[in-house]
Image (cartoon, rainbow, N blue to C red):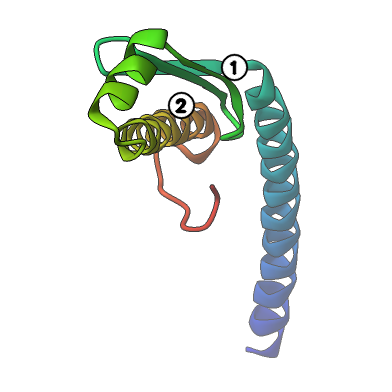
Amino acid sequence: MVRKLKGANSGKSGSQQDIIKQAQVMQQEMLKIQEGLKDKFVETSVAGGGITIKANGQKKIVDLSVSLDVLKDAVEEGDASIVSDLIINAVNEILEKAEEMAEKEMEVITGGVSIPGLF
């Protein structure tokens, strides 16, 4: 009976090492994907294209454009909050798109399992 227990323990030790190695490989693959996300982009626009924003997969905004028409409308209305509100909406939308893109990229490694706090 003692031999069986010792044999069982040694099998578990090897299994644990395999799991650790697999986790390390997965971690390296995730790091590669995260690094690659800086070169992948998403874009959105609001106000009929009056404000366009572009971000990379690391959720960094790389471009923002505001048309003169949007600015003129804000000036005519005497309300700068129009532009602010539109920019906030565009930023929130682009960050959602960047998050979705990053999650899709990570699905390759995670098999579609959501890992809280990953992004």
Q: Residue at x 40, y 28 (%)?
A: 97
Which one is nearer the viewer's eye here, 13 or 6?
Answer: 13
Q: For the residues labelled 1 and 2, say whether their Cβ atoms are less than 8 Å apart.
A: yes
Which one is nearer the viewer's eye here, 59 or 32?
Answer: 59
* Residue 44 in the figure: left or right of residue 12: left
Give the residue pinned by disc 1: 40
| Element type where label 1 sits in the image | loop
Asked if residue 45 can be seen in this view, the reply is: no
- On the image, which quarter does residue 47 sit in? top left
- How many angstroms separate mark 1 from mark 2 (CA)? 9 Å
- How many marks on residues? 2
- On the image, which quarter does residue 83 sit in? top left
- On the image, which quarter does residue 26 sit in? top right
Give the residue pinned by disc 2: 101
Would you place residue 7 above or below residue 71 in this image?
below
Q: Residue at x 24, y 11 (%)?
A: 48
- The mark that comes first in sequence, 1 or 2, is 1
The x, y position of residue 81, in whole percent, is 33, 40
Would you place residue 27 above or below residue 86 in this image?
below
What amino acid is found at the position of numbered circle 2 in the picture? Answer: Met
